[in-house]
Amino acid sequence: MDETTSKSEGKESEYEFTEITLRQIELSDVDDFMEWATDEKVSHFCIWDTYTSKDQALDYIKNNAIPHPWLRVICIKNRAIGAISVTPNSGNIDSCRAELGYVLAYKYWGKGIVTRAVKMVATTIFSEWSNLERIEALVDIDNKGSQRVLEKVGFLREGVLRKFMSIKGKSGDMVIFSLLSTDVVQH
């Protein structure tokens, strides 16, 4: 392969990563789901344990992901490479808030994909849910990449919640970020 071919393929790949879509998850996405859900590098900062079987993944997709109020897969050419969700808080006091979460297959990290997906969600979710005034995201203090994603989109880093959450049996500090319906999403 010569240098010219390599450069042109690099440009195609870069363009491909800018063309992401979000759609509802389907049972047929299970093999793509397994790519990120079985990877310990991906699940390291997640509250869920690394998946070990396709049956476990199918059960999660069928009983949790599909009925979720707002969970979408992040796709390139309709192939699921990650997921993003907005989970509404319940109750009268908390109904104006929701929590954002996302996950992406390791081989796609560092390409701006999650940043674009979060921007897509942040520009539409407030109109989809008229009572929503605030999106929150909790990020492990050591997950610098995820913190950068939120800052690039325009989320405000509000502070550190010390020993706030137990992940995989270890309590840890979490950074809380927020985006209000009145905030401007960075482009």
Image (tube, rainbow, N blue to C red):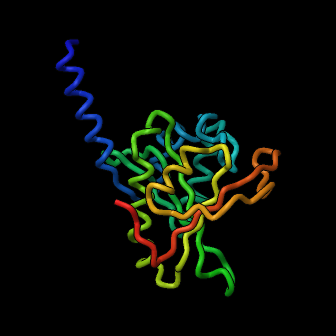
Residue lying at 63% horizontally and 53% vertically, measured from the top left: 139
Nearer the observer, 55 or 138: 138
Q: Which residue lies furthest to the bottom in this view?
A: 92
x and y, in percent, of residue 156 in the image: 54, 64
x and y, in percent, of residue 66 in the image: 53, 61
Q: Which residue lies furthest to the top in this view?
A: 1
Q: In this view, does 7 lie to the left or right of 106?
A: left
- Name above or below for residue 159 compared with residue 51: below
Count up the numbered dots: 0
Nearer the observer, 128 or 8: 8
Nearer the observer, 66 or 118: 118
Nearer the observer, 133 or 169: 133
- Name above or below for residue 71 compared with residue 134: above
Which of the 4 image quarters holds residue 117?
A: bottom left
Residue lying at 52% horizontally and 69% vertically, measured from the top left: 179
Residue lying at 47% horizontally and 84% vertically, measured from the top left: 130
Q: In which quadrant of the rendered image does the N terminus lie?
A: top left
x and y, in percent, of residue 91 in the image: 69, 83
Q: Is residue 53 left or right of residue 118?
A: right
- Name above or below for residue 3 compared with residue 129: above
Q: In this view, does 62 lie to the left or right of 52?
A: left
Q: Which residue lies furthest to the left in this view?
A: 4
Residue lying at 44% horizontally and 43% vertically, measured from the top left: 81
- Name above or below for residue 8 compared with residue 117: above
x and y, in percent, of residue 82 in the image: 48, 47
